[in-house]
């Protein structure tokens, strides 16, 4: 239901997955559909927020879920997203980074299509992208709320949650929404499950359901934090 809970609160929300250009026809990408970020934008707008969505390669049918009050700014790469976030950082009250941002991009972006080289394999050189969330935390001013997401899988060293807790400490965002990704949760048109933690590892909320229901859990936690 519509409310004015977030009246006069400006949200900048990123959604989707960045594309890191290799040549005119190829890129390195990831499985993010943008659905979680779009659900967050729709929910924040329904609660009265003034919302801008930075949409990284989000399909039109997913963007169609947004109310017309949400401003959509399309972006392609991590560097585009970095530039658009930094340009708006001073003016926002709440940043939610739900986009899956490539940590690396090809060291060179070719102007012509790369040709197959004989029968040998190919090694690509990658360079690091800026860490947008970390930069936003470093530039944070009083009154701003910065929220990150972490898509984690368990491995032989630690569980998904343990990886997420380590990320919460290193990123320093006010809240980190840790989602365990698998075939049936996380990326795409599937339910999601999030555990929300503070930088010191304190758990503040947990919830699962549709992406809109997950968005609601995240926005409730933001509302509590902002008092
Ligand atoms: O789009 P959907 O299909 O609906 O799927 C939703 C989702 C699983 C993509 C989403 O819920 C999610 O978890 N997004 C974050 C995905 C991720 O891989 O995050 P990360 O662990 O690489 O990064 C942690 C945080 O830092 C994120 O807030 C990310 O936006 C941010 N980041 C990461 C790298 C980078 N260079 N700059 C960043 O700001």
Image (cartoon, rainbow, N blue to C red):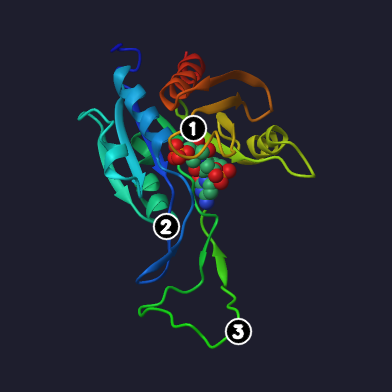
Q: Is the CB–ligand 1 distance for label 3 below 8 Å?
A: no
- Which residue is disc 1 drawn over? 146
Q: Total number of numbered labels?
A: 3
**Along the line of sight, the residue nearer the viewer: 184 or 79:** 184
Residue 167 locus on image (x, y percent): 65, 39
Q: Quadrant of residue 163?
A: top right
Residue 39 locus on image (x, y percent): 38, 29
- Which residue is disc 2 drawn over? 19
Task: Determine the CA span between mark 3 and mark 2.
Answer: 26 Å
Question: How many residues crowd around disc 3 within 10 Å: few (fewer than 14), some, or many (20 or more)?
Answer: few
| Residue drawn 48% across the image and 23% down it | 214
| Image mark for residue 120 | 3
Q: Earlier in the sequence, mark 3 or mark 2?
A: 2
> CB atoms at circles 2 and 1 under 8 Å apart?
no
Task: Determine the CA span between mark 3 and mark 1.
Answer: 46 Å
Question: How many residues crowd around disc 2 within 10 Å: few (fewer than 14), some, or many (20 or more)?
Answer: many
**Along the line of sight, the residue nearer the viewer: 5 or 116:** 116
């Amino acid at each position: 239901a519509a409310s004015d809970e977030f009246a006069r609160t400006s949200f900048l929300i990123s959604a989707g997955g960045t594309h890191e250009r290799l040549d005119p026809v190829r890129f390195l990408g990831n499985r993010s559909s943008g659905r979680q970020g779009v659900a967050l934008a729709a929910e924040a707008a329904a609660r009265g927020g003034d919302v801008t969505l930075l949409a990284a390669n989000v399909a039109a049918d997913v963007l169609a879920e947004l109310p017309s009050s949400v401003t959509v700014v399309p972006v392609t790469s991590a560097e585009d997203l970095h530039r658009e976030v930094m340009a708006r950082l001073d003016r926002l009250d709440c940043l939610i980074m739900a986009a899956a941002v490539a940590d690396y991009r090809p060291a060179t972006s070719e102007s012509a299509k790369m040709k197959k080289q004989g029968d040998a394999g190919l090694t690509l050189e990658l360079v690091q992208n800026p860490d947008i969330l970390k930069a936003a935390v470093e530039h944070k001013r009083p009154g701003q709320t910065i929220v990150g997401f972490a898509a984690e899988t368990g491995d032989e060293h630690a569980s998904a949650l343990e990886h997420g807790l380590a990320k919460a400490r290193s990123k320093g965002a006010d809240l980190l929404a840790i989602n365990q990704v698998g075939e049936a949760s996380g990326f795409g048109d599937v339910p999601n499950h999030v555990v929300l933690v503070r930088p010191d590892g304190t758990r503040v909320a947990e919830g699962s359901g549709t992406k809109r229901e997950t968005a609601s859990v995240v926005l409730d936690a933001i509302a509590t934090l902002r008092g």
